[in-house]
Image (spheres, grey):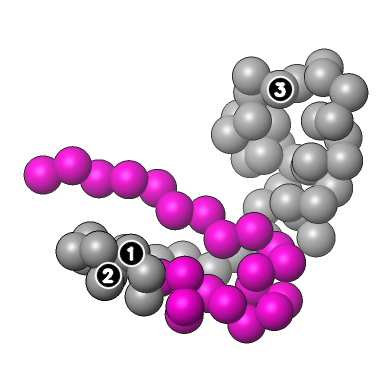
Amino acid sequence: MNRTFIICKPDAVERGLVGQILSRFETKGFSIVAAELRTLDADTLARHYEEHVGKGFYDDLVAFMSR
């Protein structure tokens, strides 16, 4: 079985779209086996977006994703 990671960006959460986003995956035949709602800190985001550290957009990306 393959697994994938889905992240809903903060603006989608603020707009109440999480249910619709997950439903689209389920409609395509994916099963949601775990879900977690949390705000990510800078250290976690640094690990997730490691390839972008030092790029011009990185600070804005971390600020957006940690709001």
Q: Is residue 50 left or right of residue 37?
A: right
Q: Are marks 2 and 1 in contact (CB under 8 Å)?
A: yes
Read off the residue under disc 1.
25
Q: Nearer the viewer, residue 61 or 42?
A: 61
Disc number lying in front (3 or 1): 1
What's the residue type where badge 3 is placed?
His
What's the residue type where badge 2 is placed?
Glu
The residue range painted magenta reads 1-22
To which quarter of the image does residue 45 belong?
Answer: top right
Q: Nearer the viewer, residue 27 or 47?
A: 27
Give the structural element (helix, strand or loop) at label 1. Answer: helix
Task: Give the position of the N terminus as an image quadrant.
Answer: top left
Above or below, comparing residue 12 to residue 66 in the picture: below
Residue name at image x 53 percent, y 74 percent: 18
Where does the image place residue 55, in percent across and percent down from the top left? 82, 19
Residue name at image x 54 percent, y 69 percent: 37
Mark count: 3
Outermost left residue: 1
The tag earlier along the polypeptide, 3 or 1, is 1
